[in-house]
Amino acid sequence: MNIGIACYPTYGGSGVVAAELGKVLAERGHKVHFISYAMPIRLDGFSGNIVYHEVEISSYPLFDFPLYTPALASKIVEVARFENLDIVHAHYAIPHATSAYLAKQILGNGAIKIVTTLHGTDITLVGLEPSYLPVMKFSIEQSDGVTAVSRFLKEKTLTNYHIEKDIQVIPNFVDTHKYRRIDTSRICNYLAPQREKVLIHVSNFRTVKRVQDVVRIFNLVRQKIPAKLILVGDGPDRSNCEQLVRELDIIDDVKFLGKQVELVALLSAADLFLIPSQSESFGLSALEAMACELPVIASSVGGLPELIVHGETGYIAEIGDIERMAKYAIDLLTNNPKYKLFAQASRKRAVEVFNAEKVIDQYVRYYEQVLSEQPIPAK
Ligand code: GMT
């Protein structure tokens, strides 16, 4: 198949999923064309089956804002024409599904099929804003196929947008060969010189991630056991978190590492992953941690309960219940036999349910299904 992938190139989960999917599809012999405004960060290494096409956005004094949606649509048209795309896979509905729809109309109905993958905030937050909602609803309805990364997100889409559409749940995935626990004695010596327990959080530090809860949970844990906290990533809430760490006077036990590429090594140097988000359609960072044998403590929101088995691969508590989350963390970190069972169960679940090969088979079957169906009549 010739597959175009329109996605965000940045650190967000949707860009990671798009890039990892494209890499595996290319390994399997498909031609994959990434279309974005910058090179997706996970697109490392060379593959003869992967081509990156950059969307150029021209500026003009009349434009206060970059006109990305039409620029992306034009690039999709160009790539579809010259590379004979069969399918355009839009990751994160805004604006990718809209640009793909526009491109399809220009190319003529039936020239390409569009699959849109809904990732989370495109549905639960941004897409609900009145300035986007009608376009979002239309773009989803007009996609030839729609997938959601969790059952939660599928239900939210159907109810929030009053859409009667067959949405396929295809969960996020992890390369369990790459994401596995490795020896990290050098990093451990640096992070926890006295063999303290290491808690870790990885995110884009948006308000929705509640990173300050991470700091507060850790503060309660370190009052009971020697522990360190590693915070990986960057974003709008980082300064507030640094301020909180100073206020709590725990600066010596907390390390802000900023954006990092070598996640496997950092996860392997840790004992427990925290993700107390306000909203989380899936929680890809938690899955990557599970693959590295980390139990996860999470809030009971969105798709997190579909990923984490409470009492088996981690624990789930109400949003903001930092006392309970800290209690769960202390319980696990002070009971070695139990901890080992949770760590093994986490890896097992990542391998058996969410491994890349298995989930990507589902995407390929879905592409084939969409390609074999009659086109949606143009509106
Ligand atoms: O909203 C974000 O934090 C970023 C967003 C993205 O698209 O990059 O993440 C969403 O997609 C990820 C990949 O499917 C999911 O693992 C995240 O749970 C989801 N974020 C939210 O729902 C808040």
Image (cartoon, rainbow, N blue to C red):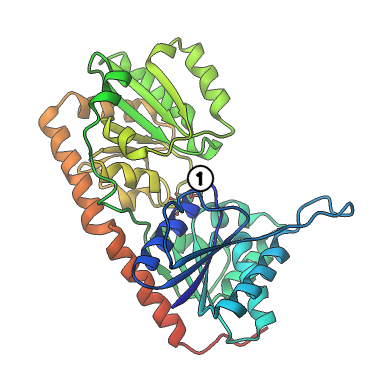
Residue 369 position in % (x across, y down): 40, 82
Above or below — where is 172 with respect to 251?
below
Which is more toward the observer, 107 or 144? 107
Above or below — where is 342 with respect to 59?
above
In what element is the residue under mark 1? loop
Graded by Cα atoms within 10 Å as few (under 14), some (14 to 19) or many (20 or more), the crowding at tag 1 reads: some
Identify the residue position indicated by label 1 in the image.
Answer: 11
Give the residue type that dot 1 points to.
Tyr
Determine the residue located farthest toward the top in the rendered image: 249
* Residue displayed at 13% across by 28% down: 336
Q: Is mark 1 within 8 Å of ligand 1?
A: yes
Above or below — where is 295 with respect to 360?
above
Residue 25 position in % (x across, y down): 38, 67
Which is more toward the observer, 345 or 156? 345
Determine the residue located farthest toward the bottom in the rendered image: 374
Residue 314 position in % (x across, y down): 26, 40
Q: Can I make out residue 238 in this image?
A: yes
* Residue displayed at 51% across by 24% down: 241
Image quadrant containing the N terminus: bottom left
